[in-house]
Amino acid sequence: MKIYTGRGDEGMTDLRDMSRVSKTSARIEAYGTVDEVNSVIGRIRPSGYDDIDEKLSAVQNHLHIIQADFANPDREDADAPHLEEHHVQKLEDWMDTFDDELDPLQSFILPGGSDAGSKLHHARAVCRRAERRAVSLASDEPVNGAAVAYLNRLSDALFVWARVVNKREGVPEEEPEY
């Protein structure tokens, strides 16, 4: 199978149902930005912490499902991959476990720290953009609400994991100066 087809040369692409849409459509923006989050997370692994890498590996698979979900305009397609509420719950459970390692947050913190911590903060910011793109798509077309909620929780999880990694590395959190 060839990687290139030439079908996108005029600014159009295929969705799961083989309908053609502009590469600038809200649907393409949404799943393209989720792809970007997935790629940024791929740059983090290995983080140096097996427990975090295990979660990030699962997250990358979940993000791949969201991409497939967003690429499918047919919400009634029972065979299509789609994210479910239990995936959102899994993120919440993971955050609760990791949060036990952290001191309570007293203020905003500046993104940064160790190499892995900084990359996790970067992934969080890109994830927030993916969430905004998904919300934009949902304002025009039916979208899986669990996928949008997952992106919201994932940005929170990436924030928690960045804090955990920085704490484990002995890198103090910096508060912004106002």
Image (tube, rainbow, N blue to C red):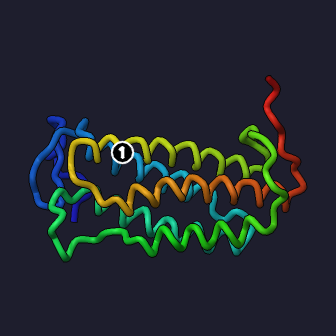
Residue count near mark 1 (Cα–Cα under 10 Å), binned few <14, some 14–19, many ≥20 = some
Q: In this view, does 36 lie to the left or right of 138?
A: right
Q: In this view, does 148 lie to the left or right of 54?
A: left
> Which residue is painted at 74% across and 69% down in the image?
49
Residue found at the far left of this picture: 19
Q: Is residue 157 left or right of residue 164?
A: left
Can you give x and y, in whole percent of width and height, for residue 24 in the image? 25, 36
Classify 162 as above or below 21: below
Q: 57 or 139, which lies in front?
A: 139
Q: 39 or 27, which lies in front?
A: 27
Residue found at the far top of this picture: 178
Classify 9 as above or below 150: above
The quadrant of the rendering that contains the C terminus is top right
> Which residue is painted at 78% across and 68% down in the image?
100
Which residue type does callout 1 highlight? Val
* Label 1 sits on residue: 135
The quadrant of the rendering that contains the N terminus is bottom left
Q: In this view, does 15 lie to the left or right of 29?
A: left
Q: 154 or 113, which lies in front?
A: 154
Numbered-mark total: 1
Q: 10 or 109, which lies in front?
A: 109
Quarter of the rendering containing residue 145: bottom left
Can you give x and y, in whole percent of width and height, for residue 112 in the image? 74, 42
Classify 111 as above or below 116: above
Can you give x and y, in whole percent of width and height, for residue 46 in the image? 66, 65
User: Tag 1's secondary structure?
Assistant: helix
Can you give x and y, in whole percent of width and height, for residue 138 in the image? 29, 47
> Which residue is painted at 43% across and 46% down in the image?
130
